[in-house]
């Protein structure tokens, strides 16, 4: 009795589901949300890759600092877009509004197909490896055990986010604090080591001794490795409609969280080098564990637990934002309409969450995802650049549009110069890896014209889609959210379900 039908047969809510499913109305909550999504497993994975490509300790630290600065420039551009185009969905919503459906769909396609599921799979595998490592001190944890624990973790957090928005955000807040405390422990122990005189690798005379000959291409790849740790700086734009007073709270969160994360990451790497030589760090399969074993003694078990806490919160954050991206794409008609529906009582996007969960588990079963991480990093930066280029185009296209936040033109121009150099040399250094990222994105072109542009599909296809939609609504107890209940007409006696 809670559904009605429009002319196409799609069911809508009669009332009660009239709001989005979360409100970020506390500045501290907004800050924790953004910081918690940036700080994840990357700081425990990327230091090895950054050092390997940068070639020296000193230059790797410069990469970490500059990486944070580039994220700050991008975040300011996204803040302007977030209040000018106040839609949830981040890059996808902005690019669709500015450049049209095809470009927006390609970003959505690459994100749903590869970007988010692969990142979730990598973080889940990191979680399971660190949880299981104490039980297998002399070898790697078994393949099956890591996959089963990763899948269990993803399923549990999917259930949490399907059950309650409040539970999901509380997990994010609690584990964000836990992550920061773990990193603070690493930093404090590292600073104590430096105070004792253990800073050979950080001495200016040795810090810039290159392990191998540097090249512009390798430096570009070092920045791509660091970008994996910083990924998440634009996550607040995926839930813009759920942020109260975005004009005030978006810049405030950026000004505090990005410098905070940059400082934490840089000091964490300095702490690593206070106990490990560059060669030891490159040979370590788990940097934080090696650090704990060398400095914490009987308390070395703290490090695997700390990384597990960090990755657990990271999985929750990625599930939260990826499901909102599916929601936004379905609302625009670029994904099945079922994904734009939310639970009648809990107001959570259950179908979108289930799709994200399923895609992640499939990638977990495939096996090696490390090459996909490179594809993801390239696609990520490609998406950022296209979106920020859209900001400049939108200013030219609609110069009189009211912009509550308007950044200086030097900010997007500086970002785009760095972006062009980074992607150009990355493509030159790794043509196969980066080229595959482009191929994956471009496979969305025929899908767009068949699934979105082709309006007059045969009746059998339309009927099959409607039946699947009805079945999904019944199983998940979901409906379209309604912004204005006064627009809803009373149920007719012919209404089904």
Image: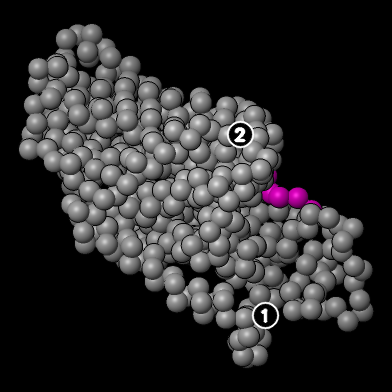
Residue 454 in the image, given as x and y percentages of width and height: 57, 81
User: Looking at the rendering, in which quadrant would you find the N terminus?
Assistant: bottom right
Q: Residue at left 51%, top 24%?
A: 256
The magenta span reads 18-22
| Left/right of residue 201 with respect to residue 301 in the rendered view | left
Badge 1 local density, few (<14 within 10 Å), some, or many (20+)? some
Q: Quadrant of residue 330?
A: bottom right
Residue 195 in the image, given as x and y percentages of width and height: 23, 8
Residue 405's tag is 2
Secondary element under disc 2, as helix, strand or loop, is: loop
Q: Residue at left 29%, top 17%?
A: 189
Label 1: which residue?
A: 466
| Picture colour scheme | one colour
Can residue 294 be found in the magenta stretch?
no
Q: Residue at left 71%, top 50%?
A: 20
Above or below — where is 491 with respect to 481? below
| Left/right of residue 337 with respect to residue 90 in the rendered view | right
Give the camera-side residue of 27 and 129. 27
Q: Quadrant of residue 194?
A: top left
């Amino acid at each position: 009795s809670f559904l009605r039908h429009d002319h196409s047969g799609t069911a809508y809510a009669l009332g009660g589901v009239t709001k989005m499913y979360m409100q970020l109305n506390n500045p501290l909550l907004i800050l924790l949300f953004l910081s918690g999504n940036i700080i994840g497993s990357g700081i425990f994975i990327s230091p090895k890759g950054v050092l390997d490509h940068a070639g020296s300790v000193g230059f790797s630290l410069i990469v970490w600092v500059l990486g944070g600065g580039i994220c700050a420039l991008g975040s300011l551009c996204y803040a302007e877009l977030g209040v000018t185009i106040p839609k949830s969905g981040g890059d996808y919503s902005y690019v669709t509004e500015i450049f049209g459906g095809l470009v927006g769909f390609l970003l959505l396609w690459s994100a749903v197909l590869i970007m988010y599921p692969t990142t979730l799979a990598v973080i889940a595998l990191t979680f399971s490896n660190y949880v299981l490592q104490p039980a297998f001190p002399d070898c790697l944890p078994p393949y099956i055990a890591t996959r089963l624990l990763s899948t269990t973790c993803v399923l549990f957090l999917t259930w949490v986010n399907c059950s309650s928005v409040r539970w999901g955000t509380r997990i994010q807040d609690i584990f964000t604090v836990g992550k920061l405390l773990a990193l603070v422990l690493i930093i404090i122990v590292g600073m104590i080591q430096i105070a004792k005189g253990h800073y050979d690798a950080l001495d200016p005379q040795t810090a810039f001794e290159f392990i191998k000959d540097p090249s512009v291409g390798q430096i570009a790849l070092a920045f791509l490795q660091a970008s994996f740790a910083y990924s998440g700086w634009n996550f607040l734009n995926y839930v813009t409609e759920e942020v109260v007073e975005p004009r005030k709270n978006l810049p405030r969160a950026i000004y505090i969280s990005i410098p905070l994360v940059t400082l934490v990451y840089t000091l964490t790497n300095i702490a690593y080098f206070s106990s490990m030589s560059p060669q030891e760090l490159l040979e370590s399969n788990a940097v934080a564990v090696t650090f704990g074993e060398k400095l914490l003694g009987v308390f070395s078990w703290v490090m695997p637990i700390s990384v597990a806490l960090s990755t657990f919160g990271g999985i929750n954050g990625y599930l939260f934002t990826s499901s909102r991206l599916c929601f936004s794409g379905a609302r625009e008609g670029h994904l099945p309409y079922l994904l734009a529906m939310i639970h009648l009582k809990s107001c959570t996007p259950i179908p979108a969450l289930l799709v994200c969960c399923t895609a992640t588990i499939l990638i977990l079963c495939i096996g090696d995802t490390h090459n996909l991480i490179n594809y993801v990093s390239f696609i990520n930066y490609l998406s950022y650049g296209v979106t920020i280029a859209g900001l400049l185009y939108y200013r030219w296209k609609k110069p009189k549009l009211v912009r509550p936040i308007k950044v200086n033109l030097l900010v997007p121009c500086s970002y785009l110069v760095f972006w062009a150099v980074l992607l150009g040399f990355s493509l030159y250094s790794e043509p196969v890896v980066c080229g595959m990222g482009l191929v994956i994105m471009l496979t969305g072109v025929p899908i767009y014209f068949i699934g979105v542009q082709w309006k007059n599909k045969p009746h059998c296809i339309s009927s099959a889609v409607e039946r699947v939609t009805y079945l999904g609504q019944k199983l998940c107890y979901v409906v379209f959210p309604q912004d204005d209940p006064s627009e809803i007409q009373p149920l007719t006696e012919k209404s089904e379900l």
